[in-house]
Amino acid sequence: MIKIGDFARLAQVSVVTLRHYDEIGLLKPVSIDRFTGYRYYAADQLPQLNRILALKDLGFSLAQIERLMQGGVSIEELRGMLLMKHAQAEQRLAEEQGRLSRIAARLKQIELEDSMTPYDVLLKTAPAMYIASQRVTIPTNDQVPEYLTPTIDAVYRHVQNAGGKDAGACFVIWHQSSQVLIDEVAEAAVPLERPIAPSEQVGVYELPATSVASTIHRGDYAGFAQAHAALLSAIEANGWESDGTYREVYLVFDPSDPANHVTEVQYPLRAGR
Amino acid sequence: MIKIGDFARLAQVSVVTLRHYDEIGLLKPVSIDRFTGYRYYAADQLPQLNRILALKDLGFSLAQIERLMQGGVSIEELRGMLLMKHAQAEQRLAEEQGRLSRIAARLKQIELEDSMTPYDVLLKTAPAMYIASQRVTIPTNDQVPEYLTPTIDAVYRHVQNAGGKDAGACFVIWHQSSQVLIDEVAEAAVPLERPIAPSEQVGVYELPATSVASTIHRGDYAGFAQAHAALLSAIEANGWESDGTYREVYLVFDPSDPANHVTEVQYPLRAGR
DNA sequence: GATACACCCTCAGGCGAGGTGAGAGTCAAG
DNA sequence: CTTGACTCTCACCTCGCCTGAGGGTGTATC
C-alpha cells in the first residue's frame, strides 16, 4: 500500500494529478481509508499510470485514455485512432514550422527597419462563393480608375437587373503580378448570395475556396506598394507560393474621402498551403 | 459604423470572439448604443484586429498583445519577446516531431504484433541525486542474485553506519549493454537525502540529472528481455541514443513473492534529448 | 504527553480563449 | 404588422490540471 505522495514521486507526477485521475475515474486507488479518506495505491498500478502517461504523450485526451484502458476498444479502432493522431500531429507540426518561420521573418524585419511594419500579413481562407464578374484590360496604370469604376458599376447593374443580391464587398482579381503596369487584365467581381443568369459581358461562376496571404491597407491607392512588398516578403519568408494573381477587396469605399478607404489585398496561394 | 456580425465576417472571426475582446479591453468598438447596447465598429479597426490576429498566430497571449498594441513596449523588448517565442516554437516543434515518431512507432508495432505491448516507454528525467554506491563484477548472468544482494546490503549498512538516510528506491547501474552477460559490472546504488562520508568500498557522489527512456516491469526477472526489447525499439524509433549503460530501479521488492516485484528499467540517453 | 512537521483530506475558485444556450430586445424588409 | 435575421446580457461549460483555505493524520522528537 503506497500513500499518494510516494506514488506521485515514483511516477513523477503531482499529487494533484493523481487526485484528479481518481475524481474522473481514470485511476482509482485500490483502497481508500473509510475514516481518514487517505488514498492508498498498489505497486501494480504503476504500470497503469505509466500507460496513461504514455498515451497522454501521444496526444490522447483523458477521456479517450479511459476508454482505451477499459479495453472497450478493438485493435482496428485503436489503429484508426492512432492514424488520426498521426495526422493531427503532422498538422500541428506543419503549423509549428510555419509559426517558426513567421517569427523569424518578424525578427529579420525588425533588424532591417527597427520598427513594426504597419502591415500584418495573415494566412486565411477565402471561402468559395458565386461571383458575377467582368474583365477589362487597362492600358496603363494611371488609367485604372477610369477603366475600373465603370466596369464595377456595370457588374452591379447586371446583378440588380438579374434580381441577384450581393453578398459582401466587391473586389478585383488582377490576373498578373503587381509588377506589371501596362495592359493589366482586371476582373471586377461581386460576390452573390445565389448564382444568377450571366449576360454577354458579365460572367457568373463559382470561385473556389483558396488559401490567401492577406493584409489590410488604409487610405488611398498611393501607398499600395508597401502592402504588396509586405505580402511578397511574407510569402517568401514562409515558403508559400503565389499563384501569380492577386485580389483587392474593397471593404470600405468612401468616394468623398479616399483616406477612409479600407482595402484588403490578397495573394492566392498554390495548394498545399 | 459596422455591426458586430458584419465586422466578424470581414475579419473571419466569430462574434463571440469580438465580444470577448471587448470584455477584456483588447479591442473596444468605437461606439456602443446607449439604449440597445449594440456594438459598432469602425472600418479602421480592421487593421487593428488584423494585427491582433497576426500576433496571436505568432503565439502571443491576448494579455501580451494588449501591451504590444498599447505601445508600451520598446523595440528592444519586442525583439526579446520574439526571440523567446522563437525558442518556444522551436521546442514545441521538437516535441511535435517526437510525438509524431512515437505515434508512428506505435502503429508499426501494432502491425507487427496485432496488440498493445504491455510495455509503455516514457521519456522522463532522472533527477540529480546523491548516491552511495559500490561496484561489483559478476562473472556469469545466473550469478547475479548471489553477487548483487550482498552488495546492496553492504551499501545500506554503510548508509546506516554513516548516519545517512535513503531517499527513495535503491537501484543498480549496469555499466554495459544488456546483451553482455559475462563479467558484468554492476553498481549498486542507494539515493541519499544528504551526502555522507564514503568508505573504502562504498563511494558517495552526485549522480547528475539525465534524460532516460523508462518502462516498468512487473514480476520476476525472467521476463526482463521483453522490457529491454521494448526500450531498445522505442529508442531506435525516436532517434534517441543510449549512453551504453542502463539502470534497474527496484520500486517494490517483495522477497516473499517475486511476482510482486515492480522494477523500472531506465536507459539514460545522450544529451540533446 | 506535548509539540513539531510532514502528510493527507475536501471544497471552492482560477487559468486561457473562447463556445453554448436561454431569454429577451432590435432592425429592416415585405 | 409580422417575419426572420441580428443583437444583447447572463450564466455555465471546456480541459487538465494548480492554488489556497481550513482542518485532520501519522510519526518522530523533546
Image (cartoon, coloured by chain):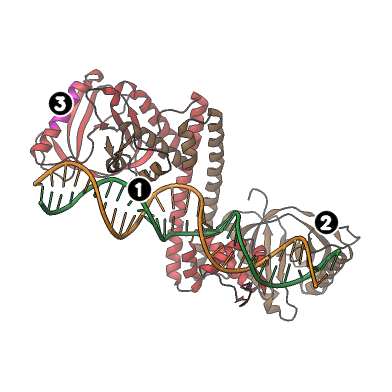
Chain colours: A red, B brown, C orange, D green
Visible residue check, residue B194: yes
Q: Viewer-proximal residue, B225 or B257?
A: B257
- What residue is disc 1 on? B16
- What residue is disc 3 on? A150
In the rendered view, does B268 fall on the left or right side of B28? right
Residue type, numbered disc 2: Pro
Element class at badge 2: loop
In the rendered view, does A60 fall on the left or right side of A130? right
Query: What separation in Å lies between label 3 and label 2 (alpha carbons)?
Result: 88 Å
Quadrant location of residue B53? top left
Quadrant location of residue B236? bottom right
Chain of the residue that carries numbered disc 1 in the rendered image: B
Visible residue check, residue A180: no
Magenta stretch, main secondary structure, is helix
Residue type, numbered disc 3: Pro
| Callouts 3 and 1 in the same chain | no
Chain of the residue that carries numbered disc 2 in the rendered image: B
Residue segment shown in magenta: A146-154
Q: Residues within 10 Å of mark 2 (few under 14, many from 20)?
A: some
In the picture shown, does residue B138 fall above or below A223? Answer: below
Identify the residue at image location x=49%, y=35%.
Answer: B67
Chain of the residue that carries numbered disc 3 in the rendered image: A
Query: What separation in Å lies between label 1 and label 2 (alpha carbons)?
Result: 58 Å
In the rendered view, does B162 fall on the left or right side of C4? right
Identify the residue at image location x=65%, y=73%.
Answer: A43
Foreground tag (1 vs 2)? 1
- What residue is disc 2 on? B195
Foreground tag (3 vs 2)? 2
Element class at badge 3: helix
Identify the residue at image location x=23%, y=39%.
Answer: A168
